[in-house]
Amino acid sequence: MSTARECPMCGEFMRLVTREVVSRVPGTMQEIKQPVREWVCPECDFFEEAEAGDGEA
């Protein structure tokens, strides 16, 4: 699949972005880091979570 998708809001091409979300466990200093993949439109800031297999060659 490609690494671009058309935005449903404005029609521009969206990009597949991978970022790390850090969550803290209450009452401890422990942090849980999870990678999150999202389709993000640079034009209108619309985003949606990527599904399994999106963007893979």
Image: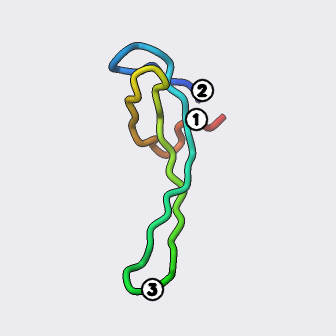
Q: CA distance from mark 3 to mark 1?
A: 36 Å
Q: Residue at x 42, y 78 (%)?
A: 25
Q: Mark 3, mark 1: which one is toward the viewer?
A: 3
Q: CA distance from mark 2 to mark 1?
A: 5 Å
Q: Secondary structure at mark 2?
A: loop
Q: Are marks 2 and 1 in contact (CB under 8 Å)?
A: yes
Q: Secondary structure at mark 3?
A: loop
User: As drawn, which residue projects farthest toward the bottom?
Assistant: 27
Q: Secondary structure at mark 1?
A: loop
Against 7, residue 25 (above or below) is below
The earlier-in-sequence mark between 3 and 1 is: 3
Amino acid carrying label 2: it is Ser
Residue pointed to by mark 1: 55
Q: Position of residue 26 (x, y in %)?
A: 37, 80
Q: The C terminus lies in which quarter of the figure?
A: top right
Amino acid carrying label 1: it is Gly
The earlier-in-sequence mark between 2 and 3 is: 2
Numbered badge on residue 28: 3
